[in-house]
């Protein structure tokens, strides 16, 4: 135990030295003097050209984080951090994570996207999404940077990009502790294509109005002028009167230790059928920790994700030290060291820590959940219906790349595609949507944002109408690939139709509420949800609506054996009784003859005397 | 480590038994006594115990020595099926044979009796180590210790049972 603590301390020391050694003196904010106090950020505001903003500046532009924060912090280095580097081809993708999910109920589409090379996700460009379009779809819950700062080759996007500006890294999204900080405003600015204004709009210092989206192509945001049309309001920013202090500096309530609420804006979950107030929060938060106590990073913002084996791909020197196992075997930050009484050690070779400790307690059937990034939780005018797409299903206990079983969230991809040489190429939504609309009609679209009720006939007709320019038109949904073959809709297996799963780690339940804490039968019974729960197969195809799959099918285990093992637990009490009685009798016989032997020795000795 | 120890143990024991068998003279004929029905039942228990013992050795050591993996899956279930039968048979044999296996001056060297009592002594940790791990008394370290205790005591038990069986065969054959 002491040895473990010593190693951890050495690791932290070495990490802090290496971080300090990397610090660039040109960026004093990245080079800590060691004080644990929070530096006061009373700083001048700079626009994207680096010019100082004062209340008298004309035109009044939004402050640029690249310039304002970048004066003391290495913006370029930060842009390679985990939250911003997805578009970099050389960035290690690490373990598969939550994708962005492109959803369009009208065209019965739900498809996982990512710029990271995770198996099972599609790249945005495969769906015709340029970085510009991608940001419009998902920028609401992006921290800026990445695709938001990529220069477009498309002339139209270049023009619109000049008006909208770049979506810079929004430092305030995480570090602004001001209670007036409004992350929902960010999403609103994205919808209005006010990328340049988005970060400023979230701060409590400004008010942003107007919409770059509505501006004509020849609009110059640096020489703004009013329009005759009262509906055409150019994007503009107003700073609060008392925002500027002495020397036109403004105060930002910037903290190094990011408040939980900031993380929650993009990383919340909401389980269907539950009231938010009934859900317990993660045990670590309840114990007084915050997200960044475990998910740490230095000035380069290469935050630890915290999964087992991360150290092999991450450049963060603490990646190995900040996993569940590492903290809980060393008692870091007061982490209780688990006894795991009565749990055979083989479980630790076959299960992740999260399998027993994270996510909701599994039930006979999986539930649906919403996430901030998939459903825009916390943004303005969000669809609160339980049925709204995308349909994320969990907890699904599935085998991971490292061979261990852990809990996952899951989506079943659904999209029209071209099949050529057994490769699937999704068809962009704008191509499919009018055709599906023509076949299904507007009445088929659910106001709740749920799937339309598609029939096999309708899918057949859509497949007929899709021109086989780049291969055979197919539809993927519910884990199957549907093709139009001789006037029949034929379902086949295909890799691209497989569900996309990503591991979950939160919310962590306390030890007493972990699987196996009550009894072995939490998992080893003939109907234990861990192995035998029904996993919903989500599909817009009306005839397949109630289909399910057994959990064990995701675990690459033998169902017959698993059932037999579960049955054996029925007889386990008898086995215990037999074993204990046998031991007692054997011990009694042994003792009896030991006493006899002793009596014999005593007698012999007595005879000798 | 355990795999190597097991291989060495089994090879050495079987080799020793084979050498002894070849070296010692005897008529090599099984002597069958006429027996009462009660004796017949008594005699059935020993082969049954041996059968269970064989099944348990195969289900535990075959995956380890041949497949190079620890016992799991169907092997484990089979192992657990034979275990209680073996425990019951062993208890019966011990109760029946303990009287005859007490040491006296006349039978020297008492190899067979030593083996018998070693079996009784080793059977207790073999059984208890696994049954205690089924209760939530021990944490991970304790569980690992119990598992190791079960493995090594079971290995020793297996080797002694082989020797004991050989000695019984020798006695029966008048060697």
Image (spheres, rainbow, N blue to C red):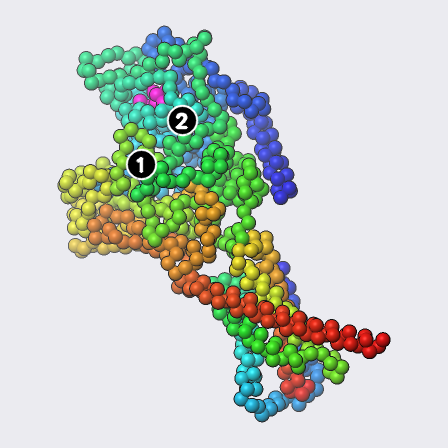
Q: Position of residue A427 (x, y in %)?
A: 26, 41
Q: Secondary structure at mark 1?
A: helix
Residue behind mark 1 = A375
Mostly what secondary structure, the magenta segment? helix
Q: Which mark is residue A173?
A: 2
Is the residue marked by circle 1 packed among few (<14), some (14-19), or many (20+) residues within 10 Å?
many
Q: Residue at x 48, y 64 (%)?
A: A573
Image side of residue A446 versus residue A131, left or right: left
Q: Which residues are magenta?
A: A194-202
Q: Secondary structure at mark 2?
A: helix
Q: Residue furthest bottom?
A: B34
Report the Cα–Cα distance between label 2 and label 1: 18 Å
Numbered disc total: 2
Q: Chain of mark 2?
A: A
Image side of residue A266 versus residue A380, left or right: right
Q: Quadrant location of residue B5? A: bottom right
Q: Quadrant location of residue B132? A: bottom right
Q: Check the picture and name the quadrant holding the N terminus of chain A.
A: top right
Is A198 a magenta residue?
yes
Is residue B166 visible in the rendered image? The answer is: no
Q: Residue furthest right?
A: A609
Image side of residue A287 versus residue A133, left or right: right
- Please, is residue B141 above or below residue A66 in the view? below
Is the residue marked by circle 2 packed among few (<14), some (14-19), or many (20+) residues within 10 Å?
many
Q: Check the picture and name the quadrant holding the C terminus of chain A.
A: bottom right
Q: Position of residue A601 (x, y in %)?
A: 77, 74
Q: Residue at x 64, y 78 (%)?
A: B98
- Please, is residue A431 above or below residue A340 in the view? above
- Please, is residue A70 above or below residue A418 in the view? above
Sequence-wise, the earlier of marks 2 and 1 is: 2
Q: Residue at x 52, y 35 (%)?
A: A316
């Amino acid at each position: 135990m002491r040895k473990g603590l010593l190693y951890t301390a050495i690791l932290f020391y070495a990490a802090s030295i290496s971080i300090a050694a990397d610090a660039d003196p040109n960026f004093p904010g990245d080079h800590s003097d060691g004080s644990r106090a929070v530096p006061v950020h009373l700083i001048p505001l700079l626009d994207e050209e680096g010019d100082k903003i004062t209340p008298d500046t004309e035109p009044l532009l939004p402050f640029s984080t690249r310039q304002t924060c970048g004066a003391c912090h290495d913006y370029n280095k930060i842009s390679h951090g985990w939250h911003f580097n997805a578009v970099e081809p050389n960035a290690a993708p690490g373990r598969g994570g939550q994708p962005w999910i492109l959803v369009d109920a009208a065209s019965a589409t739900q498809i996982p996207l990512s710029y990271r090379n995770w198996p099972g996700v599609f790249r945005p460009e495969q769906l015709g999404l340029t970085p510009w379009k991608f940001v419009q779809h998902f920028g609401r819950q992006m921290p800026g940077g990445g695709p938001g700062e990529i220069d477009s080759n498309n002339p139209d996007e270049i023009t619109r990009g000049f008006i909208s500006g770049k979506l810079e890294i929004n430092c305030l999204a995480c570090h602004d502790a001001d209670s007036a900080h409004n992350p929902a405003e960010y999403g609103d600015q994205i919808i209005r294509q006010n990328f340049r204004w988005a970060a400023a709009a979230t701060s409590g210092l400004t008010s942003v109005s107007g919409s770059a989206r509505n501006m004509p192509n020849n609009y110059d945001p640096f020489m703004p002028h009013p329009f005759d049309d009262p509906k055409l309001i150019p994007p503009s920013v107003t700073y609060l009167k008392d925002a500027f202090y002495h020397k036109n500096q403004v105060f930002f309530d910037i903290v190094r230790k990011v408040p939980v609420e900031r993380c929650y804006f993009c990383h919340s979950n909401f389980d269907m059928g539950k009231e938010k107030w009934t859900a317990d929060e993660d045990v670590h938060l309840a114990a007084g920790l915050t997200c960044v106590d475990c998910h740490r990073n230095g000035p380069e913002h290469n935050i630890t994700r915290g999964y087992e084996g991360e150290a092999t791909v991450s450049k963060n020197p603490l990646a190995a030290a900040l996993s569940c196992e590492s903290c809980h075997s060393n008692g870091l930050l007061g982490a209780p060291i688990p006894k795991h009484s009565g749990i055979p050690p083989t479980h630790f070779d076959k299960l992740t820590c999260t399998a027993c400790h994270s996510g909701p307690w599994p039930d006979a059937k999986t539930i649906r959940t919403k996430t901030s990034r998939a459903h825009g939780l916390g943004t303005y005018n969000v669809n609160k219906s339980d049925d709204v797409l995308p349909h994320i299903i969990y907890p699904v206990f599935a085998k991971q790349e490292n061979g261990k079983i852990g809990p996952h969230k899951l989506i079943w991809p659904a999209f029209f595609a071209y099949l050529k040489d057994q490769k699937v190429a999704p068809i962009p939504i704008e191509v499919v949507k009018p055709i599906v609309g023509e076949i299904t009609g507007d009445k088929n679209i659910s106001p709740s944002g749920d799937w339309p009720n598609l029939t096999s006939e309708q899918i057949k007709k859509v497949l007929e109408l899709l021109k086989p320019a780049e291969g055979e038109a197919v539809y993927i949904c519910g884990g199957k690939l549907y093709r139009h073959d001789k006037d029949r809709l034929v379902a086949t297996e295909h890799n691209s139709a497989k569900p996309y799963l990503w591991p979950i780690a939160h919310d962590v339940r306390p030890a007493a509420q972990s699987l196996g804490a009550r009894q072995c039968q939490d998992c080893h019974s003939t109907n234990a949800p861990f192995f035998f729960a029904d996993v919903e197969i989500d599909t817009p195809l009306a005839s397949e609506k109630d289909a399910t799959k057994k959990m064990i099918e995701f675990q690459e285990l033998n169902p017959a054996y698993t059932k037999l093992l579960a049955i054996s637990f029925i007889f386990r009490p008898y086995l215990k009784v037999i074993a204990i009685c046998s031991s007692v009798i054997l011990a009694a016989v042994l003792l009896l003859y030991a006493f006899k032997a002793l009596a014999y020795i005593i007698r012999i000795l007595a005879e000798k005397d | 480590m355990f795999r190597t120890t097991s291989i060495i143990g089994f090879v050495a024991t079987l080799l020793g038994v084979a050498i002894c068998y070849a070296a010692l003279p005897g008529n090599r004929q099984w002597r069958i006594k006429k027996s009462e029905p009660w004796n017949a039942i008594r005699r059935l228990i020993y082969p049954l115990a041996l059968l269970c013992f064989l099944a348990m050795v195969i289900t535990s050591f075959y995956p380890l020595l041949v497949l190079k993996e620890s016992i799991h899956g169907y092997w484990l279930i089979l192992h657990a099926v034979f275990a209680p039968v073996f425990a019951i048979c062993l208890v019966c044999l011990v109760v029946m044979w303990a009287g005859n296996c007490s040491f006296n001056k006349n039978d020297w060297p008492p190899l067979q009796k030593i083996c018998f009592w070693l079996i009784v002594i080793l059977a207790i940790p073999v059984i208890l180590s696994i049954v205690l791990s089924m209760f939530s008394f021990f944490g991970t370290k304790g569980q690992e210790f119990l598992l190791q205790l079960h493995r090594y005591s079971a290995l020793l038990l297996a080797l002694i049972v082989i020797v004991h069986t050989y000695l019984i065969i020798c006695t029966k054959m008048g060697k």
